[in-house]
Image (cartoon, rainbow, N blue to C red):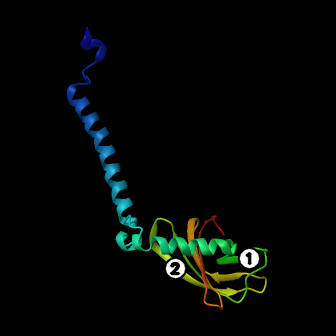
């Protein structure tokens, strides 16, 4: 009677073992693929030598506090293959006569990093040509003033497709 209802193809223990093997095999394969992709695109290192960087901590903190006390602000934008930076002082006046460079790259990978020297623009600010794909980018902007003071700021920005 059972054979007549179920037919000749029964779901056996061998079938269940195959289902479990395929299920967990797929999970393991995806995990290994993701782990490989994650480690091949970013090493996880933020600094080369953490001990040396720890010795510089107080100096870096003081430098950042001095830069914050200046009250400078930065506005960045990217459009049509051009990265533009507008710098203003505490009173909102534009900052001129400086050398501005930007190291632009992806936040989690150094593979696409590039350094762009930004030129003064007629409409104000500084700009430079660089082609960026859509997605999240990060720029380390360094401003060298004529008095040899430097000001640094890291900014993140998003590039829309087709910009």
**Towards the viewer: 53 or 116:** 53
**Towards the viewer: 135 or 77:** 77
Relative height, residue 46 to residue 2 (above, below): below
Q: Position of residue 120 (x, y in %)?
A: 71, 87
Which of the marked residues, 2 or 1, is nearer the chain's N terminus?
1
Determine if residue 33 is in view: yes
Furthest residue in direction bottom, as rendered = 146
Q: Position of residue 74 (x, y in %)?
A: 68, 72
Determine if residue 79 is in view: no
Q: Decide: marks 2, 1 in contact (CB < 8 A)?
A: no
Local crowd at mark 1 within 10 Å, few (<14), some, or many (≥20)?
A: some
Left or right relative to 155: residue 31: left
**Towards the viewer: 78 or 3:** 78
From the image, state whether disc 2 or disc 1 is nearer to you.
1
Q: Position of residue 60 (x, y in %)?
A: 50, 73
Give me the C-alpha separation between circle 2 and circle 1.
25 Å
Identify the secondary structure beneath mark 2: strand
Q: According to the image, label 1 marks what residue?
A: 88
Q: Residue at x 54, y 82 (%)?
A: 115
**Towards the viewer: 111 or 74:** 74
Relative height, residue 93 to residue 43 (above, below): below
Kindly indicate the quadrant of the structure image that contains residue 94: bottom right
Q: Residue at x 48, y 71 (%)?
A: 58
Q: According to the image, label 2 marks what residue?
A: 114
């Amino acid at each position: 009677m059972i054979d007549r209802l179920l037919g000749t193809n029964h779901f056996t223990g061998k079938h269940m073992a195959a289902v479990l093997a395929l299920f967990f095999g797929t999970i393991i394969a995806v995990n290994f693929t993701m782990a490989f992709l994650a480690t091949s695109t970013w090493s996880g290192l933020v600094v080369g030598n953490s001990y040396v960087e720890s010795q510089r901590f107080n100096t870096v903190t003081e430098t950042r506090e001095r830069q914050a006390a200046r009250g400078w602000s930065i506005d960045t934008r990217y459009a049509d293959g051009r990265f533009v930076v507008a710098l203003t002082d505490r009173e909102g006046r534009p900052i001129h006569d400086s050398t501005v460079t930007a190291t632009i790259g992806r936040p989690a990978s150094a593979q696409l990093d590039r350094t762009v020297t930004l030129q003064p623009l007629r409409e104000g600010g500084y700009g430079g040509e660089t082609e960026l794909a859509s997605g999240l980018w990060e720029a380390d902007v360094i401003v060298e003033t004529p008095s040899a003071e430097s000001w640094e700021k890291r900014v993140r920005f998003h590039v829309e497709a087709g910009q």
